[in-house]
Image (cartoon, rainbow, N blue to C red):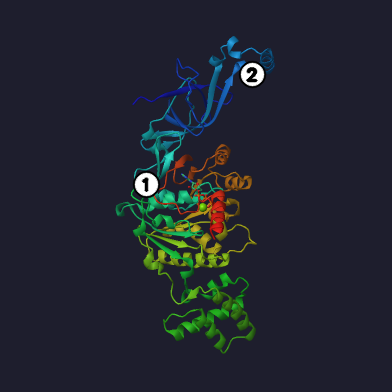
Amino acid sequence: MKAETIGTVVCTENGPSTENVSFVIGKRNDTPSDKQVPIHVGQYVSMETEEGTVFAHVEQVYKTNRYFSQIDAVHEFTRSGKAFNAIFPIDRWEYVLAEAKPLGIFENGHVRRITYPPSPGTQVKAPDTKVLGEFLGFTKDGVHLGQLLFHNIPATFNLTKMYQKHVALLAMSGAGKSYAASVMLEELLARKSSQGRPALLVIDVHGEYTGLAESRGAKGKSFEDQITVIQSPLVEIATPRMSAKAFATYAPDMGTIQVRELTRVIRTLRSTRKGQPYDIGDLITALEQDPSINVRTRDALLGWLDNLQSLRLFGKTPTPDWSKLMKPGQAVILDMSETVSLQKKQIIVDAVLRYLFDLRRDGTIPPTIVFLEEAHQFCPQARRTLAFSKGVLETVAREGRKYNLSLCIISQRPVRLSTTVLSQCGTNIFLRITNPYDLDHIRATSEKITKATLTSISSLTVGEALVVGQATRFPVFMQVRTRLTKETGFGIDFETAAKKFDDKRQSK
Ligand SMILES: Nc1ncnc2c1ncn2[C@@H]1O[C@H](COP(=O)(O)OP(=O)(O)OP(=O)(O)O)[C@@H](O)[C@H]1O
Ligand SMILES: [Mg+2]
């Protein structure tokens, strides 16, 4: 197929160089009144140079017309009331100039750096779609999240590249984070055994992922057989797996002496129980009956343990049995919508992740991806906002890669997220973000983001995403594909909800 010519490289003050190439849009005999938009910011182009085929990314598009650059003349003509185009052939003098950033040269599946600029006069073409997909790093068998914007290419990412080093899915509220995460889950659940299937855990703070398991009629897809929904009130943490240090995570005022004494009491309890499980009540009894403990230490410890007992979280064995639930090609949705206390949610996340980390380390469960909604609540940056789950999330962020335990961090407040966690995310997926503080924070934590890209993040529309990092060779703009499964009914708008409420009241 012959590549379509888009324009011609021209000389400007700072180009063509290896960093910047400008080209004027238009073929020979082109009529400038063509209604079709010939080029978009965000589009890819290619050109032949001495070094090979160079791919470039369009970053700015300008329009100019010399008839309109003389301000006083324009003003004078406007006042005279004559139509401009009756006197001058203004249409013929309008032209479009595009500025593109050369990305690299693609040859035999490898990308090389550009060391020599294209010549002025070089033809700029629309790249071959197949080659462009390979150049950007898309793979055939990968995770198909949507379509590359302005090009007819499926955005399909390599599983390892995308998840091995964690993913951050960041955007303002309502931009489509949960929707994009659901698309990811659909892709991961649809994988065949021969493609490698991870186990999945969704920490679903608002209970919005259960739709994945609901059927949507003939056309809609359901992954019912592959999903287990666990309601958070059912979760129990195994007390025998808790060391004194682990208890101290949930009672940060606990001092070293108290930790030491609790360690001793736990050790004694374990040896008398001879492998039989015990719950927090048993531990409290053991503490009360301990003959050698200092009274003040005991009372302080009892205070903390009583508090934890009142959460009704600490049982004898891990419930549900995560070691059996986490299976290849299966997802567990941990629906936390019934748990109100943030501290309780944090304790659940902390304990479950600690357990999964251990299970993953000894190879009991398959490689796992954990989706964490509202991540800023579980690993906040600020020191004063204490979060029980921050430590384990930072550990998984740092070390999870070695054990194939991966995170997909979802948040609408990147600025409040732990930078340790955020900087460990190899792939960032941004949907629309407009808050300047969030944008600054993103710029500071991700070196791959240029100023032009950052500006584009604020102009994305719902469902449009920018993918940056390990998963692609270069930042790509894409449209997230339509879901195959049902959306859980959160989307009822304000007006409808108000009407519904009124109707219900009147019918009473
Ligand atoms: N790719 C898409 N295609 C079609 N509709 C979409 C897409 N992405 C999002 N939407 C729609 O936009 C709305 C908001 O999406 P979503 O709930 O995913 O936002 P969110 O970023 O998770 O918001 P919040 O921060 O409040 O949780 C939904 O009603 C959804 O249907
Ligand atoms: Mg959401």
User: Looking at the image, which is closer to me, 273 or 373?
Assistant: 373
Viewer-nearest residue: 373 or 379: 373
Which element carries disc 2, helix, strand or loop? loop
Q: Which residue was labeled with disc 1?
A: 142
Choose the circle earlier in sequence order: 1 or 2: 2
Q: Quadrant of the N terminus?
A: top left
Task: Choose between 144 and 422: the one closer to the eye.
Answer: 144
Please tell me which residue is depicted at 55% across the width and 46% down the height of the picture.
446
- 174 in relation to 285, above or below: above
Does residue 28 appear anywhere in the picture? yes
Q: Looking at this rendering, what residue extends furthest in the top direction?
A: 87
The residue depicted at 55 percent of the width and 56 percent of the height is: 501
Residue 464 position (above or below residue 248): above
Query: Which element carries disc 1, helix, strand or loop?
Result: loop
How many other residues sit within 10 Å of disc 2, few (<14), some (14-19) or many (≥20)? few
**Residue at the outermost left position:** 194
Q: Quadrant of residue 305?
A: bottom right
Marks 1 and 2, Cα distance to the nearest angstrom? 50 Å
Q: Which mark is residue 69?
A: 2
Residue 312: percent from left, percent from top:
52, 74
The spot of residue 112 in percent (x, y) is: 43, 36
Q: What type is the residue that disc 2 sits on?
A: Ser
The x, y position of residue 67, in whole percent, is: 61, 15
